[in-house]
Image (cartoon, helix red, strand yellow):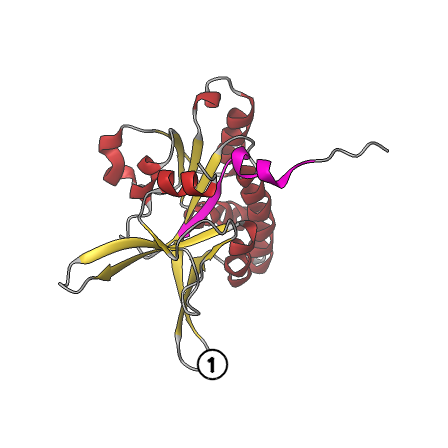
Amino acid sequence: MAIALKRTSALARDGVKLLVYGQAGAGKTSLIPTLPNPITLSAEAGLLSIAGADLAYIEIGGVNDLTDALEWLTGSAEAAEYQSVALDSISEIAEVVLGDEKRIAKDPRQAYGAMQEAMAHIIRAFRDLPGKHVYMSAKLDKSQDEMGRMLYAPSMPGQKSGQQLPYFFDEVLALRVEKDAEGIPQRGLMCDSDGLWLAKDRSGRLDPWEAPDLGAIITKIQGA
């Protein structure tokens, strides 16, 4: 049996895959123009904030739209010009998939199970797009631990789906808005967990906090 040896150094060159989550209005969508030559798959009417960037996008209204978009991204010469793919947001896309499943299933529990399975396939398929950077945004989930502390993590419909989402990515960043000493709101990407906010950077190249610029973050991760 022939063994195909690969080098781990080539992984980042095949595209950086990022999940960013944050509260509504934090500016997750406004990160998209900072990606290298992106195309956006949008399941929510929230692209007005980047209208001035004049970026290409595909509206996602159902599972068939996702399938068509994936086929286009993997097989179209026109799609080859785009360096990055943004899914805004993966939480809303999951809601679209759940809506489709609820129309089919008689039992709501069955619909959530089917949605979870479908989303695992969708996330892997888009995450593993060869040669492209992939950015998925997600809503913010808040919960309390046994000590009453607030915990923050990416949100998906269905508790199990939300818990599994971070495991699909090497880079999970929290987009936070905090006031500085003068009371002025400042945006930043948290790249390392503090025990309350979930975050991770498996590349080991990012600082605990980075400016909200995905292009600069991709450059750091790729070691350029």
Whether residue 106 is visible, yes or no, is no
- Is 71 or 14 nearer to us in this picture? 14
Up-down relation of residue 224 to residue 203 (above or below):
above
**Can you say which quadrant of the picture contains the N terminus?**
top right
- Is 143 or 94 nearer to us in this picture? 143
Q: Amino acid at mark 1?
A: Glu
On the image, the x and y values in percent for residue 187 come to: 26, 53
Give yes or no for residue 13 being in the magenta stretch.
Answer: yes
**Can you say which quadrant of the picture contains the C terminus?**
top left
Task: Please tell me which residue is depicted at 53% across the width and 49% down the height of the picture.
Answer: 169
Q: Quadrant of residue 60?
A: top left
Give yes or no for residue 78 being in the magenta stretch.
Answer: no
In the image, taking residue 141 as reference, residue 131 lies left or right, namely: right
Whether residue 169 is visible, yes or no, is yes
Task: Please tell me which residue is depicted at 53% across the width and 40% down the height of the picture.
Answer: 127
Task: Please tell me which residue is depicted at 62% across the width and 41% down the height of the picture.
Answer: 8
Instruction: Spot the residue most to the bottom.
Output: 147
Q: Quadrant of residue 45?
A: top left
In the image, taking residue 178 as reference, residue 138 lies left or right, namely: right
Range of magenta residues: 6-20
On the image, the x and y values in percent for residue 23 come to: 32, 57
- Is 80 or 213 nearer to us in this picture? 213
Please state the total of marks drawn on the protein image: 1
On the image, the x and y values in percent for residue 32 come to: 34, 38
Mark 1, secondary structure of its residue: loop
Q: Which residue is mark 1?
A: 146
In the image, taking residue 31 as reference, residue 121 lies left or right, namely: right
Up-down relation of residue 207 to residue 224 (above or below):
below
On the image, the x and y values in percent for residue 190 come to: 37, 57
Instruction: Spot the residue most to the top.
Output: 77
Instruction: Spot the residue most to the left.
Output: 182
Sort mark 1 into few (<14), some (14-19) or many (20+) by Cα contacts within 10 Å: few
